[in-house]
Image (tube, rainbow, N blue to C red):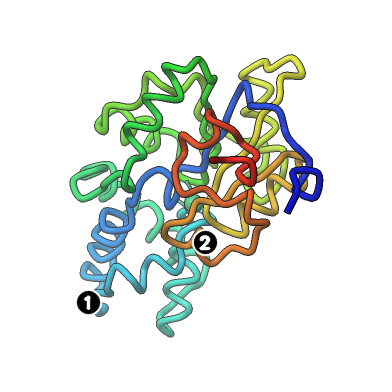
């Protein structure tokens, strides 16, 4: 295939906005631990990380509601409200004990930062928890802006969440892209009119994107975002 036949060449980005859970970090074990403490307190059966993981992506309220409903447990507003409060308290107590970066993510974030790319985060994780986790994992200084679900005007998949990050970064028309792992992230980028890249790990592997929009390494976005021209 000649270069002309390939996808349109895009300029290297000046800024990158990342989803957090499932894209940069695997926090499912900590999320599952916090959920299981809620279930245990009610005398309900604890669940595997893999099961809990299926409900991550839309923020704590949807996580608890959908998980309880799937287990045929009470999922009325009052029960879910209390479950969310207890879950967040549990999660705050142990925000990153079991959380790990996906392979190469830490070094690639460092390299992107060193290369002068401006970095932000648009996540459906609550703000305070997101900041705490980034701090504990030692990558908080790489990110100029973090907008969690509870500080967004409306959270993902609404584009205003992602656009709030971009506005806070004051990008002044600089080119930027969103990097994520779920359909929520993909829909958010699409609605915001932004290029979307899917990570090739975790749930990201299941997303349908053009080949040049799939990332094996985050650093590829600094080298050359048009992956068909990579050597
Ligand atoms: O905590 C969630 O529900 C999802 O968080 P994320 O948007 O960073 O994937
Ligand atoms: Mg995610």
- At a point 26% along the width and 53% down the height, the residue shown is 30
Horizontal and vertical percent position of residue 113: 44, 20
Tell me which label, 1 or 2, sits earlier in the chain.
Answer: 1
- At a point 70% along the width and 27% down the height, the residue shown is 11
Disc 1 to disc 2: CB gap under 8 Å: no
Q: Is residue 49 left or right of residue 122?
A: left
Q: Secondary structure at mark 2?
A: helix
- At a point 32% along the width and 51% down the height, the residue shown is 27
Q: Is residue 132 left or right of residue 77?
A: left
Q: Pick out the residue farthest to the bottom.
A: 72
**Nearer to us in this view, 87 or 6:** 6
Q: Pick out the residue farthest to the left.
A: 97
Q: Secondary structure at mark 1?
A: loop
Tag 1 residue:
43
Mark carried by residue 89: none
Q: CA distance from mark 1 to mark 2?
A: 21 Å
Horizontal and vertical percent position of residue 196: 65, 45
Observer-side mark, 1 or 2, equals 2
Dot 2: within a 10 Å radius of its alpha carbon, few (fewer than 14), some, or many (20 or more) residues? some
Mark carried by residue 62: 2
The answer as to whether callout 2 falls within 8 Å of ligand 1 is: yes
């Amino acid at each position: 295939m000649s270069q002309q036949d390939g996808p349109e060449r895009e300029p290297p980005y000046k800024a990158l906005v990342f989803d957090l859970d499932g894209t940069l970090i695997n926090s499912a074990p900590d999320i599952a631990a916090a959920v299981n403490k809620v279930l245990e307190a009610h005398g309900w059966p604890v669940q595997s990380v893999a099961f809990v993981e299926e409900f991550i992506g839309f923020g704590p309220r949807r996580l608890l509601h959908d998980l309880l409903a799937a287990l045929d447990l009470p999922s009325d507003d009052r029960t879910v409200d209390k479950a969310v409060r207890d879950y967040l308290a549990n999660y705050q107590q142990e925000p990153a004990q079991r959380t790990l970066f996906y392979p190469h993510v830490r070094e690639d974030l460092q390299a992107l930062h060193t290369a002068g790319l401006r970095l932000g985060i648009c996540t459906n994780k609550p703000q305070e928890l997101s900041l705490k986790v980034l701090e504990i994992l030692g990558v908080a200084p790489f990110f100029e802006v973090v907008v969690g679900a509870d500080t967004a005007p409306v959270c993902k998949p609404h584009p205003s969440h992602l656009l709030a990050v971009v506005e806070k970064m004051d990008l002044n028309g600089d080119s930027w892209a969103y990097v994520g792992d779920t359909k929520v992230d993909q829909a958010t980028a699409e609605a915001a009119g932004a290029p979307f890249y899917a990570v090739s790990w975790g749930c990201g592997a299941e997303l349908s994107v053009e080949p040049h929009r799939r990332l094996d390494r985050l650093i590829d976005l600094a080298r050359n975002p048009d992956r068909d021209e990579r050597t």
